[in-house]
Image: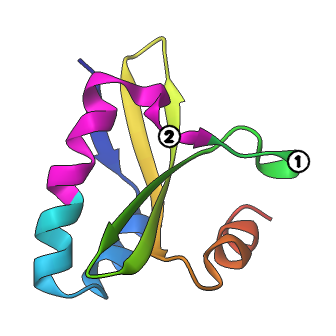
Amino acid sequence: MYRRFISNSAKRSIKKLPLTVRKILFKETEIIERNPYAGEKLSSSLSFLYSFHFSINSIAYRAVYTVNEEKKEITFHLVGVRENFYEKVRRLFR
């Protein structure tokens, strides 16, 4: 089982989500604690990241994270709705 960490940028993005979405988010991402490679590996300059997809009330959400095998840790970097999400991820990792 991996430990879950939330970066400051992810904390800020999670605070912007409605409370019901936040609760479901933490429930949905428990899958990643058991299997960190359940998310989709990104490509190109973001190939070190994984993206976990989930939907709530027909709204698509994404959570981007990294896996540290050595320490058995997962760090979430950004969470939000699908629209313009990957542009925000690119800006975060410039």
Secondary element type, mark 2: loop
- The span picked out in magenta is 26-40
Residue type highlighted by circle 2: Gly
On residue 63, the disc is: none
Q: Contact (CB < 8 A) between labels 2 and 1?
A: no
Front position in the image: 53 or 44 = 53
Residue appearing at x 50%, y 24% in the figure? 68
Which of the 4 image quadrants contains residue 10? Answer: bottom left
Count the marks. 2
Locate the C terminus by quadrant. bottom right
Residue appearing at x 71%, y 46% in the figure? 42
In the visual, does 37 lie left or right of 85?
left
In the visual, does 5 lie left or right of 62?
left
Q: Is residue 12 above or below residue 55?
A: below
Which of the 4 image quadrants contains residue 90? Answer: bottom right
Residue appearing at x 36%, y 24% in the figure? 35
Q: Is residue 40 above or below residue 63?
A: above
Going from the N terminus, do you reach mark 2 or mark 1 first? 2
Q: Is residue 41 above or below residue 25?
A: above
Residue type highlighted by circle 1: Ser
Secondary element type, mark 1: helix
Q: Is residue 7 above or below residue 38?
A: below
Name the main secondary structure of what is drawn in magenta. helix
- Compute the Cα span from label 2 to label 1: 16 Å
State the residue lying farthest toward the front.
58
Percent coordinates x, y for residue 89 in the rendering: 66, 67
Mark 2 = which residue?
39
Residue appearing at x 40%, y 16% in the figure? 71
On residue 44, the disc is: 1
